[in-house]
Image: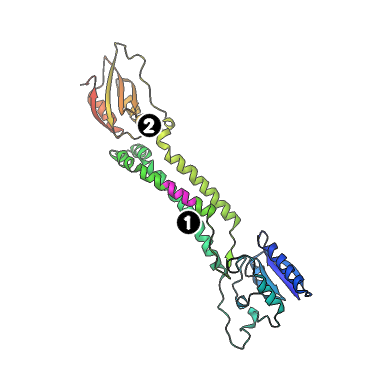
Amino acid sequence: MKIQVLYFEGCPNHQPAVDMARSVVAELGIGAVVEDVEVKTQADAERLRFFGSPTIQVDGVDIEPEARSRTDYAFSCRMYGTEGVPPREILVRAVTEDDPGPTPDSGCCGNGSNCCSEPQTPEDSKTSHNLTDRAGLAAAGGSVVSAMVASACCWLPLLLIALGLSAGGVSSWFAQWRPLFLVVAAVLLCAGFYIIYLRKSACEPSSACAVPNPKLRRFNRVMFWVATVAVLGFSFFPNYAGYLIGGTATSDSSTGDANVANVTFHVQGMTCEACATHIQRELMKVPGVKNASVSYSESQATVNTDASSPPSRDSLVEAVERAGYKVVDERHQTLD
């Protein structure tokens, strides 16, 4: 009698199955040889009638009677009920019974009737892993999109203005929904972490469970951390955007100079430091402006102008509006 334990490298239940088989042989005192056979490919699985690791055969016949008519050979893990190692009594019954039953090649169930089950494709056992992989990547990708929308109050107006389009009202609309999109991004990121790192696919009793592809698993994890970095980058974009595009100017040190006139006014619609920087650049383009300082935190712009040839009020307002924002009031001086 020959008992073979079929397995693939890395299967955690391989050695416990071998130990159990040898224990049964010693306990029954039978002259049986226990061999472990490594299955390396799907072709090997089909040739050896391998239903998942570990599969135990007695003289080439599976120890599970209900599995002897199956043809869903798969390079995969195998479950016996809720365990990864078959119960001892199944092996004991297999090595002590006179007729172990038919193999899948016999075409029947041993009583003259054709009761063998329909062939099943090994791809069915991989479905749950594929769905898990896609769900994890979808959650991570969704978190990136949500973080992008959350920071759109800052980058989208700049993009629209760069394209020569109006950005009026865009910042304020996205700014009011920013907290919600940040929460959604965090939830999706946590869901992606759970699916990719913690969730285990369910395996039906007496079925073959697909072995996760190590390369695909590694790729999914790398993409998850790339998505995490992207989410953090977009989430905090309004905080560092001003530095990326040059920062805001400081007030001219010659504010007490008789040749310099100072104008201060409020600006409506700024949502981040990048907005202030963009307004400051537009103001500096106005003829007669010597320097401009825009404060995002105070929603205020201070302009140092040439007292001998100051710019008109309309030109300053137009510069702010050209940047996509609005002057709501002016203080200290009104230019005509």
- Nearest-to-viewer mark from 2 and 1: 1
Name the residue rendered at 41%, 34% in the picture: 239
Name the residue rendered at 56%, 51% in the picture: 219
As drawn, 231 above or below 44? above
Across and down, in percent, residue 46 comes to 64, 71
**Residue 183 visible in the picture:** yes
Q: Name the side, left or right, on which 200 lies relative to 166.
A: right
Characterize the local packing of mark 1: few (<14), some (14-19) or many (20 or more) Cα atoms within 10 angstroms: some
Across and down, in percent, residue 90 comes to 65, 74
- Residue 190, magenta (yes or no): yes
Dividing the picture into quarters, in which one does residue 66 lie?
A: bottom right
- The part of the chain drawn in magenta is 185-192
**Residue 48 visible in the picture:** no
Magenta segment main secondary structure: helix
Mark 2 secondary-structure assignment: helix
**Residue wearing tag 2:** 273
Characterize the local packing of mark 2: few (<14), some (14-19) or many (20 or more) Cα atoms within 10 angstroms: many
Mark 1 secondary-structure assignment: helix
Name the residue rendered at 35%, 19% in the picture: 251
Q: Which mark is residue 135?
A: 1
- Residue 300, magenta (yes or no): no
Give the mark nearest the N terminus, 2 or 1.
1
In this orientation, which residue lies closer to the viewer: 83 or 300?
Answer: 83
As drawn, 116 above or below 132? below
Q: What amino acid type is highlighted by mark number 2?
A: Glu
In this orientation, which residue lies closer to the viewer: 244 or 176?
Answer: 176
In the picture as drawn, the residue positioned furthest to the left comes out as 336
In the picture as drawn, the residue positioned furthest to the front comes out as 27
